[in-house]
Image (cartoon, grey):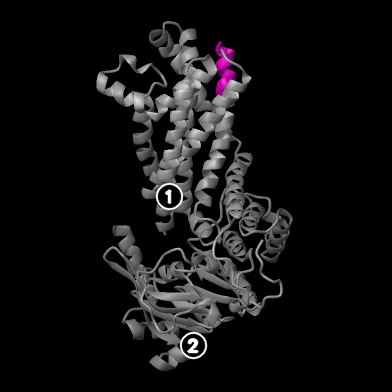
């Protein structure tokens, strides 16, 4: 099933970061991910930029061991996501629009639960929860059920939940989609702090500004394929464009916003 | 927990191989943590306690005072017969909540978070089942108390009553895997309700839980006598009223073992495949 490639990753070869080669995933007749290659060095922020339905979430789900690829291979910190999924899960944190917290529990209870599940003692899990809640400015809301939280508070708790076990690699799937500008800026600051701690971050976003602000390297994804990749400056140089918006337009023939609107229309008519 | 040295540098995974699987003790601890998560919800929403208290009492009152005289000669005689049946019926119907709760977790994305954690694949499912079985113990005690107020009298002893409760809980725990499997296969909590009822309703009402199968047509009698609900109701009734226990109890436990062996792996497999 899985094709053997020359970049076979294993814990023995000391390959840090995230490596993907030829990742492919079909859902029925739809080719959601079409031969994606990625190399993300440890300790960097990498942005997957693309419109709704481009395949970004599927790529993240494959790397986070939630979905198995139909073809291709990927490793996280040298562990293969398909054959060493349990090891990979000990190293990663997942946050974003689809990984959520339990709305009926309080902020503290959510974080303590994850601490306990990842092997912390009751006391250590409570300490870690308190520490994270303070860091994410949620101490005042710690004892309230999450369903009373605002959108920005929920995303912060969600991100805190992904950090409970001190992961080396964090997947942020559209961490700021649907947030107001102030909450978005708050989250950006937190992500920058994470990177300063030496964590590897894979971020997906539909927002050009977000990729520009946070990611050292960007892969532009369209219809399941990487159509361009490099730093924000390199992409602008490559296409002769002055903004990432124009980069996208030049590469795909359609703008990001345009594609998003089309997707929304399809969802409405479906 | 694991043998990883504290000083391991994050950048060199080769230095300390991570454990490749979850140990059985850790898996049990994870199941308990996830069971706690479901039970602590009752603390935040005490109304939920009403939710699983009202329905069994309504069933008991309805069956005894509305149907009882017609079905059992007198309401008192019928109460003596049907209490065991209602305890079993209510326990099995509760497994529908288990499946609906898991389906809601899938829909809301909480399951994705759990599945990305280094935990046993069955823990989210087993945790929910264990929590709901604990709630079930409450419902059994409640039915027993209300039944006693209505005039039910135990013909055996306290140990037999405890054995009856234990048997019902063990069998429910096993039976829940069928509903959980259905819950993993269908897309939404609403569909879980529909498909769950399609399984639970006929199974319960063609059993000997409410009436002895003796008056059913031959083909249905044959089905009813092999129905696991009939066997469990018979064993429970035997433990409360006196009468044959060993054979139906053993057959119930065999069914329970079969349900776990067949449906637990199917449910976990379906859970793994849900994105």
Query: Which residue is rendered at x = 59% and y = 43% of the image?
Result: B41
What is the chain letter for disc 1?
A: B
Query: Which residue is rendered at x = 43% and y = 93% of the image?
Result: A237
Instruction: Assign the C terminus of chain B to one quadrant of the image.
Output: bottom left
Q: Position of residue B242 (x, y in %)?
A: 52, 14
The residue carrying pointer 2 sits among few (fewer than 14), some (14 to 19) or many (20 or more) residues within 10 Å by Cα, namely some
Q: Position of residue B192 (x, y in %)?
A: 39, 42
- The answer to whether residue A240 is visible is no
Q: Name the residue beneath numbered marker 1.
A: B265
Q: Nearer the viewer, mark 1 or mark 2?
A: 1
Is B240 in front, or is A112? B240
Query: Which residue is rendered at x = 57% and y = 26% of the image?
Result: B163
Q: Tell me if A100 is positioned left or right of A21 in this view.
A: right
Span shown in magenta: B143-154
Is B167 in front, or is B96? B167
Q: Position of residue A169 (x, y in %)?
A: 57, 73
Q: Tell me if A12 is positioned left or right of B268 in this view.
A: right
Does residue B272 lie above or below B132 as drawn? Answer: below
Q: Position of residue A131 (x, y in %)?
A: 72, 63
Are the residues flagged by discs 1 and 2 from a single subunit?
A: no
Q: SS of the residue at dot 1?
A: helix
Q: Tell me if A153 is positioned left or right of B97 in this view.
A: right
Main SS of residues in magenta: helix
- Mark 1–mark 2 distance (CA, rounded to whole Å): 46 Å
What is the chain letter for disc 2?
A: A
- Label annotation for residue B99: none
Q: SS of the residue at dot 2?
A: loop
Confirm whether the magenta stretch covers residue A242: no
- The answer to whether residue B258 is visible is yes
Is A139 in front, or is B223? B223
Q: Name the residue beneath numbered marker 2.
A: A231
Q: Quadrant of residue B99?
A: top left
């Amino acid at each position: 099933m899985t094709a053997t490639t020359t970049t076979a990753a294993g814990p023995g070869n000391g390959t840090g970061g995230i490596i993907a080669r030829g990742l492919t995933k079909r859902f029925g007749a739809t080719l959601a991910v079409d031969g994606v290659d990625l190399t993300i060095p440890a300790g960097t922020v990498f942005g997957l930029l693309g419109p709704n339905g481009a395949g970004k979430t599927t790529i993240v789900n494959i790397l986070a061991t939630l979905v198995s690829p139909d073809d291709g291979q990927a490793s996280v910190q040298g562990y293969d996501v398909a054959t060493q999924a349990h090891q990979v899960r000990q190293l990663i944190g997942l946050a974003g629009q689809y990984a959520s917290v339990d709305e009926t529990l309080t902020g503290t209870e959510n974080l303590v639960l994850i601490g306990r599940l990842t092997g912390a003692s009751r006391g250590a899990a409570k300490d870690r929860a308190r520490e994270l809640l303070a860091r994410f400015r949620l101490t005042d809301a710690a004892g309230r059920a999450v369903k009373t939280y605002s959108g920005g508070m929920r995303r912060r708790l969600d991100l805190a939940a992904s950090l409970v076990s001190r992961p080396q690699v964090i997947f942020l799937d559209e961490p700021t989609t649907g947030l107001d500008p102030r909450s978005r800026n708050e989250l950006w600051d937190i992500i920058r702090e994470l990177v300063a701690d030496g964590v590897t971050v894979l971020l997906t976003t539909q927002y050009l500004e977000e990729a520009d602000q946070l990611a050292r390297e960007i892969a532009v994804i369209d219809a399941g394929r990487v159509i361009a990749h490099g730093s924000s400056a390199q992409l602008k140089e490559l296409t002769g464009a002055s903004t990432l918006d124009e980069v996208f337009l030049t590469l795909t023939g359609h703008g990001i916003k345009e594609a998003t609107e089309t997707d929304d229309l399809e969802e409405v008519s479906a | 927990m694991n043998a990883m040295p504290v000083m391991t540098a994050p950048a060199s995974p080769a230095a300390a191989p991570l454990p490749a699987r979850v140990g059985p003790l850790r898996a049990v601890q994870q199941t308990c943590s996830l069971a706690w998560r479901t039970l602590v919800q009752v603390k935040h929403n005490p109304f939920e306690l009403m939710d699983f208290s009202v329905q069994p009492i309504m069933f008991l009152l309805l069956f005894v005072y509305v149907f009882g005289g017609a079905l059992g000669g007198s309401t008192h005689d019928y109460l003596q017969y049907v209490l065991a049946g209602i305890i079993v019926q209510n326990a099995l119907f509760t497994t529908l909540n288990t499946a609906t709760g898991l389906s809601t977790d899938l829909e809301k994305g909480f399951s994705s978070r759990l599945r990305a954690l280094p935990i046993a694949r069955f823990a989210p499912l087993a945790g929910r089942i264990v929590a709901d079985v604990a709630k079930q113990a409450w419902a059994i005690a409640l039915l027993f108390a209300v039944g006693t107020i209505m005039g039910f009298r135990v013909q055996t002893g306290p140990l037999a009553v405890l054995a009856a409760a234990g048997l019902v809980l063990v069998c429910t725990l096993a039976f829940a895997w069928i509903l959980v499997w259905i819950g993993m296969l269908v897309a939404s909590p609403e569909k879980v309700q529909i498909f769950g009822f399609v399984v639970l309703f006929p199974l319960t009402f063609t059993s000997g839980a409410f009436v002895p199968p003796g008056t059913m047509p031959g083909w249905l009698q044959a089905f009813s006598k092999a129905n696991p609900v009939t066997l469990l109701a018979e064993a429970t009734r035997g433990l409360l009223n006196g009468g044959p226990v060993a054979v139906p109890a053993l057959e119930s436990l065999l069914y329970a073992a079969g349900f776990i062996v067949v449906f637990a792996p199917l449910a976990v497999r379906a859970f793994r495949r849900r994105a």
